[in-house]
Amino acid sequence: MKRISITVLGLFVVVAAGCAAKYRTVMVPPRIDLSEHDLIAIVEFESSNAGELGPLATRRFTELARRDQGLVRMMTVEPASDRRDSKAFRELGESHGAQTVLVGSLDVSDIRPNLSLSNTLKSGTLTANVAATLTVDLIETETGASIWSASSRATKTIGHISVFGGKQFTFDAEDPEQAYGPLIDALVSHVTADFQATWLREPIAR
């Protein structure tokens, strides 16, 4: 009985090894090659939330967008004006020598507080479910035409909440990056998908 079991186990290992050898994992390049755009200007993302969320989203987006792109020339610039029309983009391009510009907006809304009290009702924690939408466009500065765009929506639980007047809620985290990081990362990860490499399991030709 033991000899039969060992033989069956050996055959299973051989078959499993053979099946594993029929496939390999290969990297698929990003759908969009940012290096083709020579110099890309990035305008700090607008944010509906007062604080550091705009700069934080801009920084995280820049880091993740270029992670799988090799050497990509990017520079953060101030907008030429409050307008976002073809003339404003053309002026921005001429001022910085950029052929394309990335612009984005972060809309934070739907703050739903959650209050958790201890059994003695003497202590508790206040958090909030926060929904946010990140929209990003890649604009051709010469024409003002959008050549790529993406948006993402996510909801996360955020701590460090203060209450004013029983109705108004505000974030008072000493470290905004720690408090908002998971929310921003979820948005940016989805929006930058076209700039990231992916992995594909494919059969090996015989």
Image: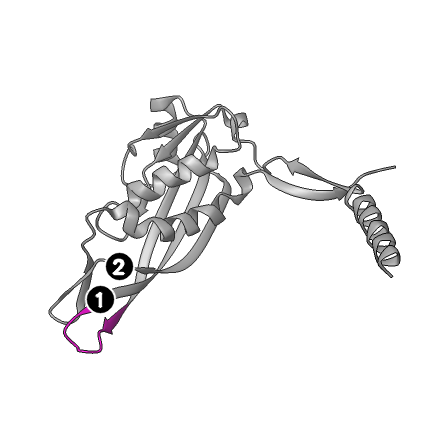
The C terminus lies in quadrant: top right
Residue drawn at 41 percent across, 58 percent down: 154
The x and y percentages for residue 19 are: 81, 47
Q: Which residues are magenta?
A: 113-124
Can residue 47 be seen in this snapshot? no
* Residue 36 shown left or right of residue 178 in the figure: right
The x and y percentages for residue 180 are: 31, 51
Can residue 25 be seen in this snapshot? yes
Q: Is residue 109 magenta?
A: no
Q: Total label count?
A: 2
Q: Nearer the viewer, residue 50 or 198?
A: 198
Give yes or no for contact between labels 1 and 2 (Cβ–Cβ under 8 Å): yes
Picture layout, residue 169 above or below residue 17:
below
Residue drawn at 80 percent across, 39 percent down: 204
Picture layout, residue 141 above or below residue 175:
above
**In the image as oriented, which residue stretches furthest toward the bottom?**
120
Residue drawn at 53 percent across, 44 percent down: 193
Disc 1: CA contacts within 10 A as few (<14), some (14-19) or many (>=20):
few
Which residue was labeled with disc 2?
159
Spatial distance from mark 1 to mark 2, Cα to Cα? 8 Å
Which residue was labeled with disc 1?
125
* Residue 131 shown left or right of residue 166 in the figure: right
* Type of the residue with mark 1: Thr
